[in-house]
Structure formats: C-alpha cells, structure tokens
C-alpha cells in the first residue's frame, strides 16, 4: 500500500493546468501518473482520448449483483497566477503545520486522493471485496468539462447501471463540521459588447453629440438589479424551486456568525434579498454577476476620449429547476431591449451548466421509491462521518457549480454523494492553495467505511 500523503505530493508536483496549452506535457504526465496509480492497485485502466484532455477510466469488475460505485474526480487544476503571491512553488508540495500546500491540493487532487487511498486500502485488506468500482478522472473540469458529456453518452450502457456516484469536490464549513453537499448551483455565461462610434473620438470635438458606450454600459448594468439586489430581468425567478423547512433548519445548525463572515470578506454590510440571510442567499437564490467590465483608457493619467466600445462579462448562478438556456435567452433579450439608439450590442453566449439537487433519504420530500443503495450510501456516510469527524454531517446546498453532476443525473439517471473535504481557508483557485491533512486522513477512513458498508462488510 502506498503512502497517501507521499502520493499526493507527487500528484501536486505535476503541472496539469487544463486551460493553458503550454502545459500539454504536464497534462500528459498527470494522466500517466493517475493511470499508474490505478494500475498498481490492480484495476483495469483505460485512457479515453477526447478532442482535448483524456479521461482516465479505471475499473474493478465483478458479479452483476454487487453494488457498483462510480468515483469521480478531476486531475486538472486552475492556473497559478499571480505567481508572485505564492509563498512556495505551487508545483512543489510543501507540508507545514498540518497542511499541504500547492496548486490543486484542495481542488481536487487531495480530496480525490481520499477515495483513491480508501479503495487501495480496502482492496488490500479484502481482495475479494464484493463491490464494483469505476473511477472516472477527467482533465477538463476547470474549463467546464466540454468532453465529458459525449463520453457519458457513448458509455451510457455500462455507466448507467451503476448505483451512485461518489466524489469529494465541494466545501465543508470547518474541520469539525463536515457537509454532505445536496445541491449545486447551475451557471450560464454571457459576454456583451456595446459599440458606439466607429473609433475612439476626441471628447472635445465630439463629446455631447454621441452616445458614449461606457455610459450606456453603466446604465445597462445598473438596470439589471433593483435596490434590494433582486435581478431585474422579467421572469428571472419564475422557476426557482422552493426551499424545504428541513434545509433552513440544517443551515441554522451551521453556526457561522454573520459578523465573522462579514469580517472575513472585509465588508461592512451584506447586500441580500429581504428575507434571506447571506448563507441562504448563496445557496437558494440565483444571481447575475458582473465578472469583468471594460471600456476606454485604463492606463496612467487621463485621456480625453469617447471610447468606441465597452464590454461586460456576465455569469448567472442558477438554482434548482432553472434552465440555463431559458435564463440565458431571457437575460439576452432583456439586454437587447434596453440598448438605446446610437449604440449597437453583440451578445455572445458562453458555457452553461444545469443546477443539481438531490434530496437525501428520510426527509419529508424524499422520493417515495428511494433507490435502496443510494439510501444505504447516504446512511453509511452519515454515520461514518459522525464516527471519524466527531460530529454528524450537515446536508447543505452549495453555491459553487460542478455542471457535470447534473448531466450525470439527466444522462445516466444517477445521483451523487458529495462529501465536502476542502475548507473555506483552503484558498481554492487562489495563491497558496492548501489542504488540511486531517481532512485527508479522516476522509480516507470515512470513505473506507462507506464503501465497506455498501459491499456488505461494514
Ligand atoms: N470544486 C469547484 C466547485 C465548488 C466550489 C463546489 C466551491 C462547492 C464550493 C469546481 O472545481 C469549480 O470551480 N467549478 C466552477 C465551474 C465553472 C467553471 C463552470 C465554478 O463553480 O465556478
Ligand atoms: Mn475548481
């Protein structure tokens, strides 16, 4: 059996930035590393090529009557920029004060290692373990998984007969309080470009005669929310699913103070819909966010122009029951309706992802014919987490997105058991990303218990 922390150190040292083509070699090395790990574990490994980054599939086959778990993870990571803000080399894992530092430590190499190590330990202890496993480790999660859905469609027959998907690529509130994630927000991205005059103009010669596109952009953006921070797009909230009482109760047990949250963000006030706490707003409500705005002169000093163009990059986070295509079209049409004479607009649609919600068993709104192995997995996770982390998990929706999880549900009919193993202080996507090693070691033990229970030996 390998040492999971040593393996994780090697994994982090491999430079798997999926969005940047200059990391092609690092992507290849990481793909080979992942497949070697599975080979050493005695699994049947297959590298599935795609138009961009391959998917590593590793299987342990067995009797058709055995439970079948798909374990999902991603071997790609976010870019490291701004590199000067890192205290150590992002591709050389450093262990300090019980944390392992490096790009991908928390998102997603470390949490994923919990399940890989759990399976390795289990198979060593019980070579005859009556459990079928399929690892699907993709290399394109951080760029929106463009080639995973076609893979799911192609392999539908062999994958859809699994019982559930197990993964750790979500957040827990603290090292003492683990969350099982039961909802992810969806997403739809748009890019708006406004054009006024056909060139930047001298603002003295022409200012006052033309509609300035920077001004038009400000007016447009300002029109997209009301003073209570509701999105001011007709129909935007029509399909939003209601929130169950048990969900609000669960969230109250979270125990994080609004004051502490405010302080951690460096703000003096929240800006949420009336009737929603900030913790509710990020989970239960959709948003429209400006991710980037630009127009005119950005350099030092001043420049007296009327710019020719202005742009906005927008994403909407969506909640259960909202359709990204429908919302994308609504927002697009609303923007077009608000473009004044003298300005033309071009709107380009970006990536999209469907929101996801899974109701755990034993709740008022749990589906009647709950799949028995999914129920068993949720129950096993509940008690395994209580035993290993000292406290029962909270079942919470999360504000982030993993669009492929909803695709897995609609394409394969499978739900996901998501165990949060990264923490708010882990700085995912940011400089000095790290993972708490106690989350890894306890995560391995919890994962082993869940899988053993499903196999009928725990
Ligand atoms: N692991 C995150 C998703 C996540 C973040 C879940 C925080 C729960 C809490 C994932 O790798 C990610 O960053 N997803 C992107 C998706 C986007 C590129 C479509 C996101 O949420 O922005
Ligand atoms: Mn990520």
Image (cartoon, helix red, strand yellow):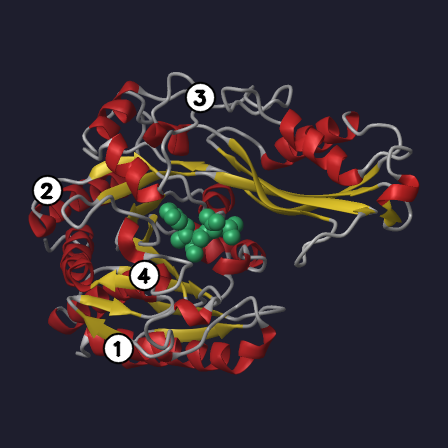
Q: Secondary structure at mark 3?
A: loop
- Packing grade of label 3 (10 A; few <14, some 14-19, many >=20) is some
Give coordinates of residue 450: x percent, y percent: 18, 52
Pair 1/4: label in front: 4
Name which of mark 1 and mark 3 comes first in the sequence.
1
Q: CA distance from mark 2 to mark 3?
A: 32 Å
Give coordinates of residue 141: x percent, y percent: 48, 59
Q: CA distance from mark 3 to mark 4?
A: 31 Å
User: Depth check: 426 or 33 in front?
Assistant: 426
Q: Which residue is mark 2?
A: 391
Q: Residue at x 78, y 30 (%)?
A: 336
Query: Which label number is shown at residue 7?
Result: 1
- Please, is residue 323 above or below residue 152 in the view? above
Q: Which residue is mark 4?
A: 106
Name which of mark 3 and mark 4 comes first in the sequence.
4
Q: CA distance from mark 1 to mark 3?
A: 45 Å
Q: Which residue is mark 3?
A: 273
Mark 3 and 4 residues: CB-CB less than 8 Å, in contact?
Answer: no
Mark 1 and 4 residues: CB-CB less than 8 Å, in contact?
Answer: no
Q: Secondary structure at mark 2?
A: loop
Mark 2 and 1 residues: CB-CB less than 8 Å, in contact?
Answer: no
Pair 1/3: label in front: 3
Q: Secondary structure at mark 4?
A: helix
* View extreme (top): residue: 275
- Please, is residue 49 above or below residue 68 in the view? below
């Amino acid at each position: 059996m390998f040492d999971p922390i040593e393996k994780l150190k090697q994994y982090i040292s491999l430079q798997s930035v999926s969005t940047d083509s200059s990391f092609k070699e690092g992507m290849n090395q990481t793909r080979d590393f992942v497949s070697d790990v599975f080979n050493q574990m005695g699994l049947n490994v297959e590298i599935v090529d795609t138009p961009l980054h391959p998917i590593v599939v590793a299987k342990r086959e067995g009797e058709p009557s055995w439970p079948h778990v798909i374990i999902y993870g991603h071997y790609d990571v976010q870019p490291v920029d701004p590199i000067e803000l890192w205290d150590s080399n992002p591709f050389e894992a450093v262990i300090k004060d019980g944390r392992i530092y490096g790009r991908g430590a928390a998102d997603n190499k470390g949490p994923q290692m919990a399940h890989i190590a759990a399976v390795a330990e289990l198979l060593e202890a019980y070579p005859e373990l009556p459990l079928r496993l399929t690892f699907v480790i993709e290399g394109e999660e951080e760029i929106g998984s463009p080639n995973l859905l076609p893979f799911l469609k192609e392999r539908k027959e062999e994958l859809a007969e699994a019982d559930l998907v197990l993964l750790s690529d979500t957040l827990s509130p603290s090292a003492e309080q683990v969350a099982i994630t039961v909802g992810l927000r969806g997403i739809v991205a748009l890019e708006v470009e406004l054009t006024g005059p056909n060139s930047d103009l001298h603002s003295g010669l022409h200012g006052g005669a033309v509609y300035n596109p920077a001004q038009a952009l400000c007016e447009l953006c300002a029109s997209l929310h009301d003073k209570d921070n509701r999105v001011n797009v007709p129909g935007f909230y029509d399909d939003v699913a209601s929130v169950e009482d048990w969900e609000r109760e669960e969230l109250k047990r979270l125990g994080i103070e609004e004051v502490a949250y405010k302080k951690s963000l460096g703000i003096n006030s929240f800006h949420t819909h009336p009737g929603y706490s900030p913790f509710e707003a990020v989970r239960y409500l959709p948003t429209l966010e400006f991710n980037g705005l630009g127009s005119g002169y950005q350099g030092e000093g001043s420049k007296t122009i009327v710019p020719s163009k202005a742009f906005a990059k927008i994403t909407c986070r969506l909640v259960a029951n909202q359709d990204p295509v429908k919302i994308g079209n609504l927002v697009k049409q609303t923007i077009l309706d608000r473009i004044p004479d003298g300005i033309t607009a071009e709107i380009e649609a970006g990536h999209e992802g469907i929101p996801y919600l899974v109701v755990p068993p034993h709740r008022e709104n749990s589906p009647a014919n709950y799949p028995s192995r999914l129920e068993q997995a949720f129950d096993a996770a509940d008690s395994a987490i209580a035993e290993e982390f000292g406290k029962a998990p909270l079942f919470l929706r999360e504000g982030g997105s993993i669009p492929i999880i909803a695709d897995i549900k609609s394409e394969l009919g499978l739900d996901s058991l998501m165990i949060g193993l990264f923490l708010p202080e882990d700085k995912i996507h940011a400089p000095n990303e790290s993972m708490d090693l106690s989350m890894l070691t306890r995560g391995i033990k919890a994962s082993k218990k869940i899988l053993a229970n499903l196999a009928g030996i725990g």
